[in-house]
């Protein structure tokens, strides 16, 4: 069974409404595969505040309301994704950030994937373009089902 680290850019697509949300269908299918037990997920603990921040921003601009934000976050927390503590990954994340010029936040997800022999799935094309040839970073839009 495949293990994936998923980042908040993927998780936001599980919550944000709209058929015009790019790669939402791919994200939903990935979540369905998790729920069906076909794949496993792992997230660094940074995932939760990052996702909450995305939902807060979307609420501020009227893309979702406060109830959708809180309900969406709770529904994902109820799925009980296994978490990795950032303090276990932070040295590797800093090293990756220093080498690549990416943020420590992005690098924390990469470090999580490397530490568990998993692939990081992201909707952030710039992250994939910048790191995908050197690290196990895969774009949501290119995942084969």
Image (spheres, rainbow, N blue to C red):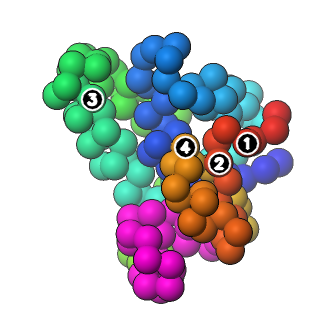
- Residue of label 1: 142
* Residue at mark 2: 139
Tag 1 secondary structure: helix
Give the left or right position of residue 73, taking residue 118 as reference: left
Q: Earlier in the sequence, mark 4 or mark 2?
A: 4
Separation of residues labelled 1 and 3 (CA atoms): 26 Å
Residues packed near mark 2 inside 10 Å, few (<14), some (14 to 19) or many (20 plus): some
Q: CA distance from mark 4 to mark 1?
A: 10 Å
User: Which of the numbered marks, if any, corresponds to residue 58?
Assistant: 3
Q: Residue at x 23, y 35 (%)?
A: 57
Where is residue 139 shown, x and y percent of the image? 65, 48
Looking at the rendering, the stretch of residues picked out in magenta corresponds to 91-116
Q: Main secondary structure of the magenta part?
A: helix
Between the residue at mark 3 and the residue at mark 2, the CA separation in whole angstroms equals 22 Å
Would you name the residue on which mark 4 appears?
A: 123
**Structural distance between the alpha carbons of marks 3 and 4:** 17 Å
| Helix, strand or loop status at disc 4 | loop
Secondary structure under badge 2? strand
Q: Look at 49% across and 37% down and name the residue there.
A: 11
Foreground: 12 or 124? Answer: 124
Q: Are marks 4 and 2 in contact (CB under 8 Å)?
A: yes
């Amino acid at each position: 069974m495949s293990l994936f680290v998923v980042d908040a850019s993927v998780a936001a697509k599980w919550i944000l409404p709209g058929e015009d949300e790019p790669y939402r269908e791919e994200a939903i299918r990935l979540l369905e595969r998790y729920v069906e037990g076909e794949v496993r997920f792992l997230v660094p603990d940074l995932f939760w505040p990052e996702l909450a921040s995305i939902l807060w921003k979307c609420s501020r601009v009227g893309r979702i309301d406060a109830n959708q934000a809180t309900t969406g976050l709770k529904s994902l927390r109820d799925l009980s994704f296994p978490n990795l503590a950032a303090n276990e990954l932070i040295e590797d994340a800093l090293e990756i950030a220093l080498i690549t010029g990416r943020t420590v936040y992005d690098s924390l997800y990469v470090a999580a994937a490397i530490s568990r022999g998993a692939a990081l799935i992201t909707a952030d094309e710039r992250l994939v373009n910048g790191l995908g040839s050197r690290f196990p970073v895969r774009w949501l839009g290119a995942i084969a089902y």
